[in-house]
Every structure is written in C-alpha cells, then in structure tokens.
Amino acid sequence: MKIWPFFVLLGMGYSVYILYSKKLDRFYIGQTKDLNERLVLHREKQFEVSFTSRANDWKLFHSLPCNSRTQAMQIESHIKKMKSRKYIFDIKEFPEIFENLKMKYP
C-alpha cells in the first residue's frame, strides 16, 4: 500500500482526506479547508478525545479536492457510510469513482 508523505502542498480549497494508521490498521476520513494544517493537528493529537488521538503514526493515504465545503461534507459522509476498506482502496485506484461522487454531490 503506497502512503503519501505526511505533508503535501495543496491549494486552500476544501478537501476530503483519508488517513491510515499502521498501528491501528484503520482509516480515518475527514474534510478540511487547509489540509496541511489539519494533518499537523492530527499528528500532534490536538483533538484529544478524537479517534485519531489513539495513534501517532497517521499518514495521508489519499486526498480528494472538492469545490466547496458542502460538497466535501457530503462526499466525506458518503465514504463513511460505505464502511468499506475496499471502497477506500477503490477510490484511490479508480479516479472515476471520485469524479462520479463530485457529479452526485455538486
């Protein structure tokens, strides 16, 4: 499984992001306007009672640029509702899945 470096340079638009912890062997899905800042906050355990505070080895697995916060929230919710590791891998492997989500949630 290819994991991206923790810091990536993206524009300041909204993104859905997927983190992976090898320690927990779990994914975390979130959305944000500033991906770099959010990744630092997760890594530094700034969200003390959150799921991501259980591990300190979170890596960026994939990020999906969105057109608005509303779209990012809808796509984040959709991915979480799928409750599927396979779906998460498929989103990364097949970009057309994300393009279809962007059309479904404009």
Image (cartoon, grey):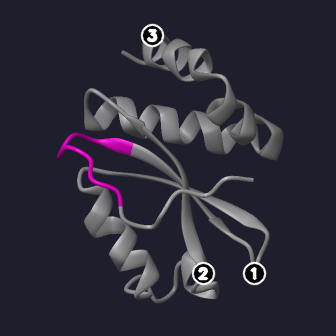
* Disc with the residue nearer the chain's start (3 vs 2): 2
Q: Point out the stretch of residues depicted in magenta.
A: 8-15
- State the predominant SS element of the stretch in magenta: loop
Instruction: Name the residue tied to disc 1.
Output: 23
Q: Crowding at label 2, few (<14), some or many (≥20) Cα neighbours within 10 Å?
A: some
Q: Does the stretch in magenta take in 10?
A: yes
Work out whether residue 68 or residue 86 is closer to the camera in this orientation and state it. Answer: 86
Identify the mark at residue 103; answer none if there is no mark.
Answer: 3
Comparing labels 3 and 1, the label whose residue is closer to the camera? 1
Residue, disc 2: 57
Provide the secondary structure element on which disc 3 rests: helix
Left or right: 73 as drawn, with respect to 79 = left
Amino acid beneath label 2: Asp
Q: Is residue 43 above or below residue 105?
A: below
Give the residue type at disc 3.
Met
Q: Are marks 1 and 2 in contact (CB under 8 Å)?
A: yes
